[in-house]
Image: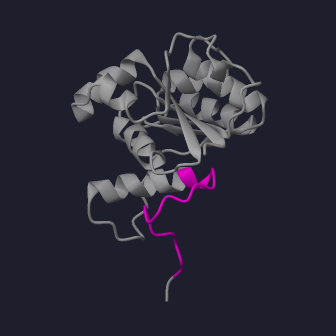
């Protein structure tokens, strides 16, 4: 039985693997319903980075929304969700969220998430950050959003790239109190 909904968006930043892995892990969460949005640049990255087709990504989600459908259910605060994750998050999407410029469904759903005081996690993928990026991150943080750049932690002694990806995915899902198995080793101290 589904009793919780979460929105997962992929944008044109590098790191499509984070959004894909989030959806894969969420498929195992029977009580959760995933709502997917992907930008056109996100589709290009999906194909380039993972050699994955749009339909393959769509198959991982419970509900798929067109990025241009600003009248979708998730564009309204009346449609109850537990929150939203944008992974990867482009600097364009970060700027749209920071300035409430709801020009597509990703930015609109993020705006709704913030206005309804729901959890919003953005995983920005850009280095190095310029001052505009940092100020936009500050604005989103001041509005209640969480900025979570996918920076790996090495204390868990990960040995493979999939383990690094799972560490980030597990920590992001932790913000929503989603138990996702043994995706990563939390810090337990030394000794």
Q: 181 or 86, which lies in front? A: 181
* Camera sees residue 131: yes
Q: Residue at x 62, y 38 (%)?
A: 5
Q: 163 or 129, which lies in front? A: 163
Residue 140: x and y in percent read 67, 33
Please give left or right for residue 152 compared with residue 97 in the image. Answer: left
Please give left or right for residue 188 compared with residue 101 in the image. Answer: left
Residue farthest toward the front in the current orientation of the protein: 1
Q: Residue at x 68, y 35 (%)?
A: 81
Q: Residue at x 40, y 36 (%)?
A: 60
Residue 80: x and y in percent read 72, 32
Residue 95: x and y in percent read 58, 23
Q: Quadrant of residue 160?
A: bottom left
**Magenta stretch holds residue 187:** yes
Residue 122: x and y in percent read 56, 37
Q: Quadrant of residue 111?
A: top right
Q: Quadrant of residue 152?
A: bottom left
**Magenta stretch holds residue 47:** no
**Which stretch did the figure color magenta?**
173-189
């Amino acid at each position: 039985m589904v009793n919780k909904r979460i929105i997962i968006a992929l944008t044109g930043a590098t790191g499509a693997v984070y959004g894909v892995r989030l959806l894969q892990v969420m498929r195992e969460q029977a009580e959760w319903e995933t709502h997917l949005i992907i930008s056109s640049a996100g589709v290009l990255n999906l194909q380039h980075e993972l050699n994955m087709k749009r339909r393959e990504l769509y198959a991982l989600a419970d509900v798929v929304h067109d990025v241009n459908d600003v009248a979708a259910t998730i564009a309204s605060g009346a449609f109850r969700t537990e929150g939203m994750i944008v992974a990867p998050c482009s600097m364009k999407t970060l700027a749209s969220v920071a300035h409430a410029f709801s020009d597509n469904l990703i930015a609109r759903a993020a705006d709704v998430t913030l206005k309804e005081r729901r959890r919003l996690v953005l995983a920005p993928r850009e280095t190095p950050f310029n001052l505009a990026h940092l100020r936009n991150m500050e604005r989103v943080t001041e509005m209640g959003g969480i900025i979570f750049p996918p920076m790996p932690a090495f204390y868990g002694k990960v040995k493979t790239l999939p383990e690094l990806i799972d560490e980030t995915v597990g920590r992001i899902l932790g913000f929503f109190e989603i138990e996702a198995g043994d995706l990563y080793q939390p810090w337990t101290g030394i000794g």
